[in-house]
Image: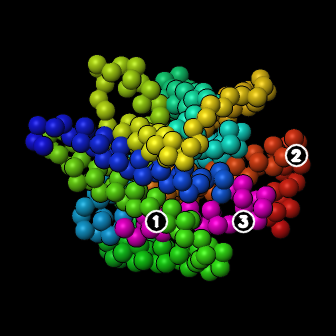
Amino acid sequence: MDDVPTPLILAGCGLLAGAVVGVVARAARFCTFGAVEDWILASDTKRMRSWAFAIAVAVIIVQFLDAAGVARLDQSFYLSADFGWAGAILGGLLFGFGMAMVGTCGYGTLVRMGGGDLRAVVVFLVMGLTAYMTARGFTGVFRETLIEPLNLDLTGVGGQGLSHLLSSALGVERSAVAFGLGVVVPATIVWWCFKDPAFRRAPRDILAGALIGLAVAFGFATTGIIGSDPFEPQQVESLSYALPPGETIIYFLTFTGATIDFGVGLVLGTFGGAFLTAAAKGELRLEAFDDAREMRRHLAGAFLMGFGGVSALGCTVGQGISAMSTLALSAPLALASILLGAAFGLQYLVSGSVREAFSALRFAGR
């Protein structure tokens, strides 16, 4: 083991975590956009509660790992002092709307690819390359000049975690505040999830949420422990499908000069888990665009997801579960923006009118 490079070990960990996500998403229909769709169109909240349960499981385990000095959350970019509130809101709205145009999110795209959906292959390529350009290329100019200058510097309170703010405001040790939040927040979420009789009678959705939450905690644990190698230090991270798809594409394009990491392993594992599950269930079939109009919608949606995901520093999983488990301030902002963007996009697809989509959202909010 001493001779195996640290990035390769973490890539293996990402492969395992991704395989769990791929299997769960394919077998249990754990889908963020599907949850939003069920909620808005059918008033069915079981999948939304499953997603919330995943957050609760991730929060309580990750906060425990951090208290034990394992997760090293203080080194995660989610808790950095550079609070990108504008990116979380604008990027989240764009990602959510793009998700509605495509019909799924980042990891959902990989799950669809695993079943043979050729439309998802196109979305993966466009979303991945756009995300990489937004992080390190041409479209990144817009992010750097229009969004990042609005960031708030929270160095004075130590970071952008909710525990940082409360600790500073109350004059209490951050570790004590984090422990309290690590109990109260997930307990509240679990109460909301299980107060619904339909969710209590849905063991598949309960198990799916628990497994996704465990996968997120596993990501922080492995990158926190193994990634602390003094000779090859690695970024503390967990599940996210905003930038990793683009990094995976670049990795295969520049194989001889590239280094595999947790994110690349995560992408490959998610696709592999979904493929094996689809094969086992007899669901492998090639699907393509019905017409040019559908293709244009998917291309536009994939672009918005790539740009929005990187601007928000995460997707439905990256910000919606991983960042939420760190109790970062950006997480609820990004998550709420993604859900709002997806809801608006869904209403737009149903009505075909921007005005009617706005009206539907205003009516639903009353």
Q: Residue at x 28, y 19 (%)?
A: 256
Which residue matches tag 1?
A: 210
Say whether disc 3 or disc 2 marks the residue closer to the N-terminus. Answer: 3
Whether residue 217 sits left or right of residue 1 in the image: it is: right
Q: Nearer the viewer, mark 3 or mark 2?
A: 3
| 45 relative position to 332: left or right | right
Kindly state the secondary structure of the residue where label 1 is placed.
Answer: helix
Magenta range is 36-61
Vertically, is 158 above or below 301?
below
Residue hosting label 3: 44
Q: CA distance from mark 3 to mark 2?
A: 20 Å
**Residue at the location (53% across, 22% down)?**
138
Quarter of the picture containing the N terminus is top left
Name the spot of residue 54 as percent of width and height, x first: 50, 63
Residue 51: horizontal and vertical position, in percent? 56, 62
Question: Marks 3 and 1, how far apart in space?
Answer: 20 Å
Which quadrant: the C terminus? bottom right
